[in-house]
Image (cartoon, rainbow, N blue to C red):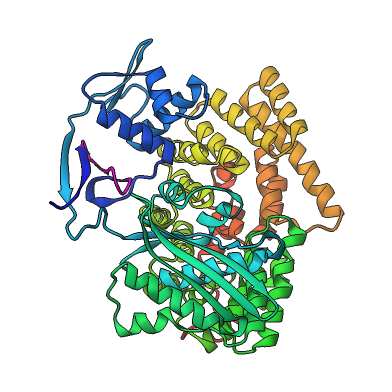
Amino acid sequence: MDPERQVYEFGDFRVDAQTRVISARGGAPVHLTPKAFDTLLYLLEHREGYSAKDVLIKALWPDRVVEENNLDQNISALRRALGERRDDRRYIVTVPGKGYRLVADVKARGIAMGGGNLIPIRSIAVLPFRALAPELQDTALEMGMADTLITRLTGIREITVRPLGAVRKYAALEQSPSDIGRELAVAVVLEGHLQRWNDKVRISVSLVRVADATTLWAATFDKKFEDIFALQDSIAEHVVDALTLELDSELKSRLTRHDTESTAAYESYLKGRYFWWKTAPEEFAKCRDHFQQAVDADPDYALGYCGLNSYYGFGAAWGFLPPDDAWPKAEAAISKALLLDDRLAEAHTGLAALKLICYRDWAGAERAARRGIALSPGFDEVHYVLSFCLLAAGRFDQAIAEGRRALAIDPFSPRMNEHLGKCLYFAGRHTEAIRQFCHTLDFAADNATAYESLGDAYEREGMADEAVTAWRTSMTLAGDEDLAACLADAWTHGGLVTAVRAVAQRRVARLEAQAQEGRYIPAAAFARARARAGDVDAALVHLDRAFDERNVYALLIGLDPAFEGLRASPQFAHGIAGINRRRASSSLNLSAI
């Protein structure tokens, strides 16, 4: 008899115990941390009575001593994910002094899998490769092997592939593939070990089914490093075969397509990608040099130019680099990449960002992003860029929907989760934004920007105590104890408006000091701080420059509640109108791309 997997249905939700997937009406995924999912599953399996707190804690943390607060936080996260509000207990009720009980009407059923498979394989995580010998560790190559395989598999529509950002942290963690797979909510995990010496490389890989830790396929390869591309072809093809996926000829061709035949260019590109993920400015800047070395080694390496664009474009978009200097370099790089290979989703993603932020070409940006999605529907970054494009255009419902698509690919990305919260916030859906920011903090508790955004949402809902608490936490996490003390003191003695203005004035002074040191500071940062400080005239002066600057902050001025007090000004209205007008010309003819 074929094995079965247990499925529970209640309210608008469906829970698959084996694949660890919870979906809402219409199949939309619901994102839970692994421990919150364990909590839900326990309540479902013991729904005939209440579950005592001490019993729940022992079941969820069998090998650890934890406080009752850990359980309470999981219950809170679960309630938020199910859409319950403070006094709305449709699904979970608290038994005072005892524990919790699931009160929803639950239907449980088993689904036969057939063919001996325990679960349908529709999702995979490719883990960073590890060194076979610690003394021969090559971090950039080990991470790069995973990155390359993720990129190749992402183009297959039939499966969801967790992006590199979701798996990077596991390079330094000692966990079994099954445990990691459960945390990432995937069906299978590809793990590998790598050792390189001189011109040779040995790679061992295994594909592990998460549900029962069964190895579906394993192999060891001993090759010359110059054969690295053929080796990657072989691994990708074996993974597809093991997952019993049927690919058409185009997908088969894309699966084994080489972006370069130069191992020197490829190595430089991998080092560039490695440093691109670094947060320290001096380390992040190293990615530029490695990407440049990649295209110097192979002038026809389209991905290398995408890398250069990602450095200059990201830096210009988010205020790390002066936009007038960085955007022309980003444009030159992405134009070259598209001329070399217009089938790269990464290239169309970069083009979308360029058209949106630099040229404010809304329609062109959307076309480029949708072209990228058509080429690689599992590429989370292109969904993120399209969502931002729709947000900037004020198409909130579509922006939120696209943000959710990005999250379906990478459910535990703090950046993607916070972006969705921002979409809800700018749409005026503050209660939902609060839930989303809280959800982000369930698995990214040290995220200072998420706490700051949460405080802003609380402020809009008139929840002053909660707003100040969230802001103070953000400042503390950012290492800014002086600003946190300023906020606390002003809040105690003068109320919320006084506290907001005191902090804003302190920030204005800091921005001015940084500018005097020669640092580039986006004008919108000055304008927002001045507006929060209540200095309308000075804020409008800074907005004159901010409206013309080509960064994301300029695109959000019209949406940001911080500028409410300025919107009646003709100067403000004129600036917003300028942002919404498409710039008529560009330095390169990209309109046909």
- Rendering coords of residue 14 (x, y %): 24, 43
Residue lying at 69% horizontally and 65% vertically, measured from the top left: 136
Residue lying at 53% horizontally and 81% vertically, measured from the top left: 229
Residue lying at 44% horizontally and 25% vertically, measured from the top left: 71
Quarter of image, res 399: bottom left
The residue lying toward the viewer, choosing from 83 and 527, is: 83
Q: Say if 152 sits above or below 535 in the image.
A: below
Q: Say if 470 sits above or below 214 in the image.
A: above
Q: Say if 496 sits above or below 580 in the image.
A: above
- Rendering coords of residue 248 (x, y %): 29, 81
The question of residue 264 being in magenta is answered with no
The residue lying toward the viewer, choosing from 237 and 573, is: 237
The answer to whether residue 270 is visible is: yes
Which stretch appears magenta? 10-21
Quarter of image, res 8: top left
Q: Is residue 559 left or right of residue 403?
A: right
- Rendering coords of residue 102 (x, y %): 27, 25
The answer to whether residue 361 is visible is: no
The residue lying toward the viewer, choosing from 157 and 386, is: 157
Q: How many marks?
A: 0
Quarter of image, res 50: top left
Q: Residue furthest top?
A: 97
Q: Is residue 15 left or right of residue 414?
A: left
The question of residue 20 being in magenta is answered with yes
- Rendering coords of residue 426 (x, y %): 47, 47
Q: Is residue 371 left or right of residue 258?
A: left
